[in-house]
Every structure is written in C-alpha cells, then in structure tokens.
Image (cartoon, rainbow, N blue to C red):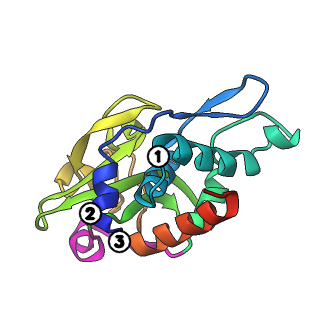
Amino acid sequence: MTGTNFSRLSKIPPQPWQVDHGGGINVGYTCHMAAMHWAQMALGSSQTDANRIVGAFARLHCPGCKGRGPHGSVLPSAYGNTFCRNAVPISDRASLYKNVQVGDVLITGHHRMPMHTMIVRQKRGEGHITVRGFNNFGTLGTGIRDHYDPKSHNIAKDKYWGARDGGFGRVGVPIPLWVVPHNHFMQASRMLRHHVGK
C-alpha cells in the first residue's frame, strides 16, 4: 500500500457517508471521517466496511452515544490524538514543497484538535501541489459545505497563503497548516482496523 494508492482513493466519494448512531440517528461525515474511510479502503476494506470502521470510531467517542449530549461526527480531539500526533507544522508556502509527499494528510488548526483534513493528490513542483477532500468549503472556499469536493485544488497558489501572517486558507481566514506523513496516518488506521475487527 502506497501513498499514491491512498491519494487515488480520495477521488472516490465515500459511500455511504453517514454513520448510524442507533435509534434511527444518522450523522454525516466530516473531512476527518472521509480521510479515515479512504485509509481503510487503502488497507483493503470495501466502502461498506470502511464506513463500519469509521462509524465504530465515531460512536466510541460520541457524547450522545454515552448519554452525555447530542450525537455528532468524529470528535476533533479524538481524531487528532489518534491520527495526527506525528503532525509536522508547515510554516509557510516556501516550506510546503519540501515537507509533503503524495498520500500525506494535511490538517489545519492544531494537530490535537484539527479543523480540516485533506489528502495530497499530486506534487509536480513547487507551484503544483494538489489536494482532495470532503467539506473543503470553509478552508478553500470550494465545493459544497458538508459534502465531498469532486475536484483537486492546487494549494501552492498565492491565494491560499496569508501575506502578513503566513497562515494557510482563504484570504482573511489564515490558519496553521500541518502535515501528517502517510506512514503515520496508515499506522493509526491499521490499529483502528485491528481494534474494531475486519
């Protein structure tokens, strides 16, 4: 299993893209859950099995499933602590090219509580590094909120980097960018797969 295979799978919309919390409650995917889903597919799961594994993780950390609040998607803190502990900060656009590879996972915000997740699709030079994701709207201003974004986006463009504060994202909304190396993300994915069973 390679980073290239993982990145190619990000071109396939997760199906299904909702998780059953019981009692007829279905909760939609987030960008984090989509990345987890594609990783499970890279490990050999079908779409249905990937959804089952992602759902098990979501329910394990869901306040609603524990009777302590509303049902929701994967908690950012649970995702961050499980999948993003080895994240490396990308300080500015100049350091993007040397720090990412195809199949790496990019996150925004804080690595222990990520705000957004994307998969590196292509790397063809300092001026061409593309990503795919789910719910890219808030970070990139593309696609539809809370849905799969069917297009790759070149994040090496000027418009995604704040001129004054160096943050990443849409102009006026710069946030820190981190990279989770492919092998670390997949290691966490294997552990999850083992924990919930194939």
Residue carrying label 2: 4
First in sequence: mark 2 or mark 3?
Answer: 2
Q: Nearer the viewer, residue 196 or 83?
A: 196
Q: Which residues are magenta?
A: 86-101
Near mark 1 (Cα within 10 A), the count class, few <14, some 14-19 or many ≥20, is some
Q: Secondary structure at mark 3?
A: loop
Q: Nearer the viewer, residue 99 or 74?
A: 74
Quadrant assignment, res 129: bottom left
Quadrant assignment, res 106: bottom left
Q: Which mark is residue 91?
A: 3
What amino acid type is highlighted by mark number 3?
Ser
Query: Was residue 183 drawn as part of the magenta stretch in this picture?
Result: no
What amino acid type is highlighted by mark number 1?
Ser
First in sequence: mark 2 or mark 1?
Answer: 2
- The x and y percentages for residue 68 are 87, 41
Q: Secondary structure at mark 1?
A: loop
Q: Nearer the viewer, residue 88 or 73?
A: 73
